[in-house]
Every structure is written in C-alpha cells, then in structure tokens.
C-alpha cells in the first residue's frame, strides 16, 4: 500500500515526492530472500535526483545461518530506469446496452492500453480520445473474426488522472497503464505483430525485435470461448502477469509485461493455465514494445528492496528530491 504527494519546492529544488510504503516479505527457509516493490513516481532526471528514506518495522531481523554466522536484513531504495507498470482494470459487460470502463489514480502522461474481445459478436470503437494500436494496415482493428473478435487501442492520461472508454455490450475489456512511455513515439516497433493461431492451444504472442534499450514488452493473449481467471493464469516465462478478464461462454483476455534491458529479439512463450487441458481453444496474441522517454536517464519509478531472510514486515517512508 502506498501514498504519494508532490509539491514544488523553493531555491534549487524542482520537486519533492513523498510516500509511505508498507511491505511484508515471504519466508524462504534455509536461503536468503528479498522482496522487491516498484512504486510509480512522477518522472525525474536521475542525475539531478536524490532519494532519502527511513524504515520502521521488523527489518533488522538477525537470522542464524550454517556455521553459526548471522546477517542483518536491510531495506534499500533506488530510482528505477525506464518504464514502470502502474496498474490496470477489467470489465465484464453482460447488459444489452453499451457501458463504460474507467481507470483512475493516473498521472498526466501515463500511457494506457485498452483491449476488447468477444467470441462471436461485433466490437466497436471505444470512442473519442482513443487511437487504434498500429497493426499492419491490412489487419482490421477491430478484426471481428469471431476467433475471438479482438481490438487494441491506446491513449495518454490527462491532468484529471482518469481514462474512460465506451465499450460494447456482451464483451470483455481490459485496461493496463504504464509510466515513462515516450509520448511522441510510444511504440518501439510498428506495425505491431499479431499472431493468429486457430488451433487447440493457449495463446503464444509472436516474436518482436526492438530498436531501443529498456523497452517494456507487453504480451497479450486471447481465447475464444474458454475461461481463464487471474488466479489460474501463468504468464509467459520471465513475464509479470497483468490483468486477466473472462466471462462464461465468452472470451478471455490475458496480459503480461517485462522490461527488455538491451534491444534485440524477444519471443514470449505461451500463456498457460493451471489446467491447460481445459483452457486450450482457438486463440491469438499481440506483442507490443513500448519505447521509454528520452533521455534514458529519466526514471518513473522507485524500486524498494527489503528482506534478507525470514518473515519481515514494516513501513518505508521515502522522499524523491529533484533539483533544478
């Protein structure tokens, strides 16, 4: 749980961001263990920024190790390079009329992706302010091919921190947001590869080759009829699971993301379920590379690493001070 506030400082200070972050590590019997938390912040220039913190709670736990030695647990903070995941939301629409899906608590300039799917109905545009992600010009968006029908759009959050889309009835919708995306060229690769696999398997997003370092790779999978919820979804290998949404007798949307430190080829593995035999279906996938803001030294998140061994909990109070 985190809280964040920002105000302009005087003198040589450009801005100060403050937050309070609660944490709890997990037991890792017989071995060292760390928990890493990523806290989105308003972007700062790393070379002009200082991070301060204080820690309260069980973070100085001393654990006995083999040979009679001992070591202390610590909490460390640093500015994280490039793009960070902010969060997302999902919506099931089972009514006969269109509705809205909204994502709030955003910062101005946050990049938001919207995906929609339905197994056998026509999808429509989400309305004003949304732009279709750049697929091949010969690939319609929405595709409305019933395998499932799918679409992808994007927008940038404004000053009110809320993004809303008008969505069609009887369909699934998913929004995910990222901070630190290049506002002039958000997609590092265009057109975006879209894989269609009309076979009884789980979605395997296609390969992509990035141009710039520190891109955020977003893998998206769609199932035509089978249901897969977040608690039973396994993302591609080395990816973090984003949002997952499904409804009975309709489609499933799965999202995942990872940072690619060095530009080059990336080929996400399949999404998986805890019971793959009951989730294989007609499917497809997208792979998207988001380009970070320039210069690369801009940071949009604070990375807090806590723990060394044993179960610990506590609170980190932090400040991010950017100078002019």
Image (cartoon, rainbow, N blue to C red):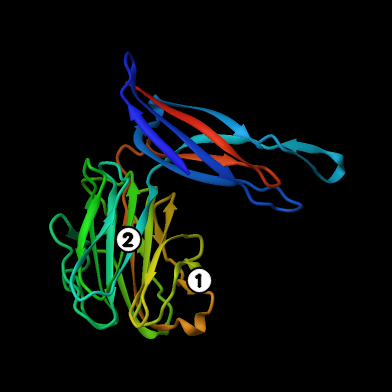
Classify residue 224 as left or right of residue 159. Answer: right
Depth check: give the residue in front, 16 or 44: 16
Cβ atoms under marks 1 and 2 closer than 8 Å = no
Q: CA distance from mark 1 to mark 2?
A: 23 Å
Residue assigned mark 1: 232
Examine the rendered structure and indicate whether residue 163 appears above or below residue 304: below
Q: Quadrant of residue 167?
A: bottom left
Q: Quadrant of residue 242?
A: bottom left
Classify residue 204 as left or right of residue 25. Answer: left
**Which disc, if any, is residue 288?**
2
Please name the residue shown 40% across and 31% down the image. Answer: 46
Camera-side mark, 1 or 2: 1
Q: Quadrant of residue 133?
A: bottom left
- The image shows residue 50 at horizontal and vertical percentages of 45, 25
- The image shows residue 294 at horizontal and vertical percentages of 30, 39
Examine the rendered structure and indicate whether residue 235 appears above or below residue 129: below
Under circle 1, the secondary element is helix
Outermost residue toward the top? 11
Please name the residue shown 72% across and 37% down the image. Answer: 61
Outermost residue toward the right? 67
Under circle 2, the secondary element is strand
Depth check: give the residue in front, 41 or 55: 55
The answer to whether residue 254 is visible is no
Q: Earlier in the sequence, mark 1 or mark 2?
A: 1
- The image shows residue 34 at horizontal and vertical percentages of 62, 46
Classify residue 256 as left or right of residue 309. Answer: left
The answer to whether residue 238 is visible is yes
Could you classify mark 1 by the number of other residues whose Cα lies within 10 Å: few (under 14), some (14-19), or many (20 or more)?
some
- The image shows residue 180 at horizontal and vertical percentages of 33, 43
Please name the residue shown 28% across and 50% down the image. Answer: 111
Question: Which quadrant does the C terminus fall into?
Answer: top left
Could you classify mark 2 by the number of other residues whose Cα lies within 10 Å: few (under 14), some (14-19), or many (20 or more)?
many
């Amino acid at each position: 749980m985190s809280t964040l506030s920002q105000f302009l400082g005087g003198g040589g200070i450009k801005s100060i961001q403050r937050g309070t972050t609660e944490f709890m590590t997990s037991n890792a019997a017989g071995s060292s263990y760390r928990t890493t938390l990523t806290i989105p912040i308003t972007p700062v220039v790393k070379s002009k920024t200082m991070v301060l913190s204080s820690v309260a709670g069980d973070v100085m736990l001393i654990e006995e190790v083999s040979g009679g030695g001992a070591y202390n647990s610590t909490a460390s903070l640093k500015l994280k390079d490039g793009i960070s995941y902010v969060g997302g939301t999902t919506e099931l629409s089972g009514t006969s009329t269109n509705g809205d899906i909204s994502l709030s608590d955003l910062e101005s300039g946050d990049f938001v992706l919207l995906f929609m799917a339905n197994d056998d109905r026509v999808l429509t545009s989400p309305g004003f302010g949304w732009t279709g992600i750049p697929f091949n010009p010969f690939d319609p968006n929405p595709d409305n091919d019933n395998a499932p029908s799918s679409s992808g759009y994007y927008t940038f959050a404004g000053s009110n921190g809320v993004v809303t889309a008008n969505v069609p009835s009887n369909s699934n919708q998913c929004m995910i947001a990222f901070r630190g995306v290049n506002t002039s060229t958000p997609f590092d690769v265009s057109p975006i590869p879209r894989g269609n696999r009309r076979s009884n398997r789980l979605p395997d997003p296609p390969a992509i080759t990035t141009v710039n370092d520190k891109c955020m790779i977003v893998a998206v999978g769609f199932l035509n009829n089978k249901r897969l919820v977040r608690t039973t979804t396994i993302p591609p290998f080395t990816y973090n699971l984003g949002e997952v949404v499904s409804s009975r007798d309709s489609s499933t949307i799965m999202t995942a993301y990872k940072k690619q430190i060095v530009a080059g080829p990336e080929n996400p593995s399949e999404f998986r379920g805890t019971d793959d035999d009951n989730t294989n279906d007609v499917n497809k996938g997208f792979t998207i590379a988001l380009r970070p803001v320039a210069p690369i030294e801009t940071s949009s998140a604070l990375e807090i690493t806590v723990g060394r061994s044993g179960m610990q909990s506590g609170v980190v109070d932090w400040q991010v001070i950017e100078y002019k």
